[in-house]
Amino acid sequence: MNLYIRYFDKEVLVDNVDDAIQFLADIDEIGMNPILEKDIRNYYNSDMYYPKRYKVRPRIYFIIIKTEAKTMLDFKEKRALHPVQEVHEKKNVSALARLNEEKFGWYEGSLDFKRVQIVPGTGKFQYRDTHFVAQCKAVSGMDCYNRIIDHLRERVDERSQFPSAKGKNFHFQFLGLCK
């Protein structure tokens, strides 16, 4: 893993954290200190591939970027990009495909939604976070979601707010085939 560091027109591509710290220590304006050195070492050893920006003074920063590039030319021509975005896209596609995958059987779906309830004493209404879990026969995860929502719409106030099936507030699990 290499580090690209830039501060105005001064830039370098180094293959270890010690060279990066030495480069920054040679720039008087940055003022290298033990706290900054520790933070740079933690960034280098972490799994984070996003660029890191450090404030020198108001509106003045230097930047550090992790890269697989072996030379400055490779880095400038973006030949050694880390495939972070592709991983996230594949994860989202597989989650959506899993939601619509047809597999008849028992499903357990859990849902967090905003339920409208009356406040005793005042007679006013308010939203309350509610967790609901149900087991049902369904054809897919989406069918499980639709069955749960249909069930809840008949039993709670019509002003209650339900999350999207694709969101983080709905989870389902295939339990097994029907007998």
Image (tube, grey):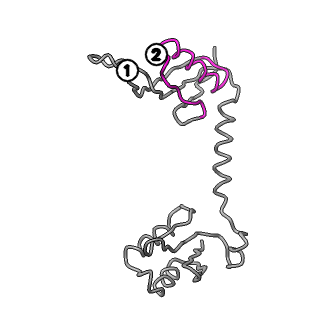
**150 relative to 56, above or below:** above
The quarter of the rendered structure image containing the C terminus is: top right
Q: What residue would you read off at disc 1?
A: 125
Disc nearest the viewer among 2 and 1: 1
- Asked if the residue under mark 1 is in contact with the one under mark 2, i.e. CB atoms within 8 Å, the reply is yes
For the record, the magenta segment spans 137-166
User: Image point 71% across, 26% down: which residue?
Assistant: 102
Q: Earlier in the sequence, mark 2 or mark 1?
A: 1
Q: Decide if residue 102 is on the left or right side of residue 174.
A: right
Q: Amino acid at mark 1?
A: Phe
In terms of secondary structure, where does tag 2 sit? loop
Of the pair 167 and 29, the residue shown nearer to us? 29
The residue carrying pointer 1 sits among few (fewer than 14), some (14 to 19) or many (20 or more) residues within 10 Å by Cα, namely few
**Cα–Cα span, label 2 and label 1:** 10 Å
**Residue found farthest to the left:** 121
Amino acid found under the numbered disc labelled 2: Asp
Residue at position x 36%, y 17% in the image: 118
Q: Is residue 114 magenta?
A: no
Residue 48 lies in quadrant: bottom right
Residue found at x 57% / y 83%: 10
From this view, report whether residue 96 is shown above or below residue 132: below
Near-viewer residue (152 or 105): 152
Which residue sits at x=41%, y=81%? 31
Q: Position of residue 117 (x, y in %)?
A: 38, 19
Tell me residue 14's x, y (percent).
Answer: 58, 80
* 143 is within the stretch colored magenta: yes
Q: Quadrant of residue 1?
A: bottom right
Report the residue marked by disc 2.
Answer: 157
Position of residue 91 measured from the top left corner of the image (x, y, whole percent): 64, 45
